[in-house]
Amino acid sequence: MSTEGKMSVKNRARLALNNDFLRSAVRFTTERLRSGKIQASADHGSWDEWRERGRQIRLHTIANLDYYLTQFADNARANGVHVHFADTAEEAVQLSLNIAKQKSAQSVVKSKSMVSEELHLNKALESIGVEAVETDLGEYIIQLADETPSHIIIPAIHKNRYQIADLLSKEAGETLPPDTSILAGFVRNKLREKFLDAEIGMTGCNFAIAETGSMVLFENEGNARMVTTVPKTQITLMGMERIIPSWTDLEVMATLLPRSATGQKLTVYMSGITGPRRDEDGDGPDEMHIIILDNGRSLQLGDPEFQELLNCIRCGACLNACPVYRQIGGHAYGGTYSGPIGAVLTPALKKNVAEWDDIANASSLCGACYEACPVKIPLHDMLVSLRRRKVEAGRGNKLEGLGMKGFAAIMNNSKRYRAVIRLGKIGQKLVARSGEIRLKAGPLKGWNTYRVTPTLPKHSFRDKWPTLEQEIRGGLQNMPSGMEQRLQNIMKDRNKGGGS
Amino acid sequence: MSSDSHEAWLAELEAASRQKQETFMNGIASKLRRPRVTNRPDQPFRGAPDFWESFQWSSEERISMFTQNFQAAGGHVIHVADAVQAADFITNKAEEMKAARLLMQNQPSLLALDLQQRLSQAEISVWNDQPETDWRAKAAEADFGIVEADYAAAYTGSMTVMSSANKGRSVSLLPTVLIAIIPVDRLKTRLGEIMSDFDAAGREGLPAGIHFISGPSRSADIENDLTIGVHGPGIVYAVLVDSW
């Protein structure tokens, strides 16, 4: 991944754009999920009130994270869970390996966990001779292909059934037809054996309920239930921000998450696991560990521009809504998380804008991600903040900086501005043809390679302003108070120096 | 490894974890630029929006909406008057599908269905009624798993099963077909009506496993093509019973 990360987003996007199957599969899948989401949220009604409620619950929990996390840890321990804390990915990996060694594990079955992807845990387990088996159908497929997920909800979005049949045939030792139900049937049987053989089951965590120390998993296949029911030891990897206070708060998350992810009213399975099996129970794990991971998350705390990033419930709605993701797919983002959330989360978690700044530019800032987000994270504002921080850190493009300085000098003075426009109107005669400039050289190269620059009009906005002003005078609209407040807050934070 | 040395290993991890927890939490407080929050904070918004809490369907509406939603997710719904009709349904289904092995939760009302009498050819097991049996394997080889749901929610088309000594999690998970009895007085309108019971029960009142089930196991991971029965049961019958 790190080498992939060093390639620029433009190069990775170019690879993706040349892959016709990938492009049409991504477009088809995101469209299916997006229209499902739009339908489900409209059917449910009062969607914005639910979003606002979800946002409020997440804001409150994160603002009091030390309290709720402590409460969760206390309750989970009282349930008999072994709770661990890890500052870094390396610490979480060490804890996991330590448990696997202690249990003399040969095999670990896993259900989908983005935290595990962050840790690159499968490779680490393999390095000590432990087989790690992904059991979500899509995750299993990309594990066989030795690839990473390209979509948070549909990880194998980029593979067609023929490629999948090839991969599974190798595993089966016989040729399987490219028929979905036969392929899925093979995986069901194959993984049944794996579930029954594995010493350890490993899961992620969608939500952790502080008041009862329970962990909650949403899924459709039943593999997460298998992983938490069959093996003798369960390890759960959990981002430190996954907390919600109560089960009634879970109703809000259960309303927002499946509808936003796939358009379902609820995933087929939603499981709340409260500790290892009770002594008298006939199944469930004997021993249960929960590893709570920071890995850059706490860097967002107290940062007015990025704290809301921790509200994310990992639904993928912003990917499906994003015009850039829909063209280039997940791998072009180069990190564990893709799409708009990945474009912000990857540099934010690494606190390394320099290395990851290019994906902050892989956005049109249209705000579709914010519109789609079930907890109203202003991702497009965050992308702008990332770009600003890069410039403030002196890592901006020098030429661009010079251009901006010149722009500021012109815009600050109406006489200069008028003079430049007059010059422009004369100058453009050299390159304009019937109202368009197509010159692919100099500062116009980047833009004109894919688009056409319109010429300056005969009558500019400034020329028309005296008449327009008269028209508008009648009924001037005020900005909605919420928007005005938000803009003012951003300005306040910026003046306080929040942009370091 | 002896169990003593394993306990010692766990104790060592525990001590390290408690120590780490302090720095972890202090780190959070310092990043938030305030002292540690040690008293329960006032929660300004808890649970669903207020208007939602008063939303209620009539019993008829609950039954019809549950049916509609559960069927839309690929499940089957049967509505019967009493336990005898429920037993008839299970018997007929087992014969029709040639089910050889049935596994059911150890619940008095399920035992009272008298399935052993009705299906003399089939092997019928009752969860966890003998200590020496490998119940995991029993569940994995069962054609039918039969459970009694603790709750259901019409709005999402979901049922809830809670684990205990007599109610294995595997019974609703490993068999090929799941048959769930839902007494209609346990069918609520909203998820929140169920959740509030869990909040009221508190940590000590909750079982290890609480599972909401909203249809057959499914996946769309291969070319968006819907596949049923990937890991969990691919055929699910919800049997609504008026008087149970």
Image (tube, coloured by chain):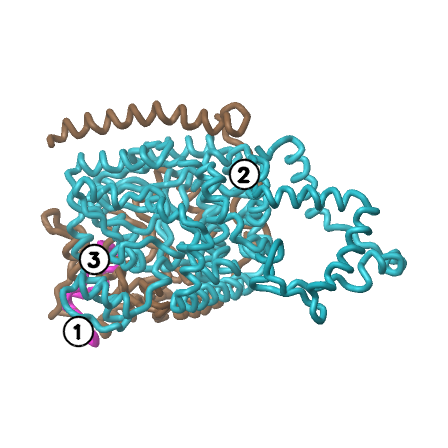
| Residue type, numbered disc 1 | Lys
Q: Which residue is mark 2?
A: A395
Of the two numbered discs 1 and 2 in the rendering, the one whose residue sits closer to the viewer: 2
Q: Secondary structure at mark 2?
A: loop
- Residue at 47% across / 42% down in the picture? A347
For the record, the magenta segment spans: B95-117
Give the drawing colour for chain A. Answer: cyan
Q: Secondary structure at mark 1?
A: loop
Asked whether the viewer can see residue A422, the reply is yes
Q: Is residue A455 above or below residue A93?
A: below
Give the letter of the chain under mark 3: A
Same chain, labels 1 and 2: no
Tell me the brown chain: B
Of the two numbered discs 2 and 3 in the rendering, the one whose residue sits closer to the viewer: 2
Asked whether the viewer can see residue B191, the reply is no
Residue A360 locus on image (x, y percent): 52, 48
Residue A299 locus on image (x, y percent): 48, 34
Sequence-wise, which precedes: disc 2 or disc 3? 3
Q: Which residue is mark 3?
A: A191
Q: Which residue is mark 1?
A: B98
Q: Is residue A172 above or below residue A401?
A: below
Work out how far the residue at label 2 is from the one at label 3, CA to CA, in angstroms: 49 Å
Work out how far the residue at label 1 is from the one at label 3, CA to CA, in angstroms: 25 Å
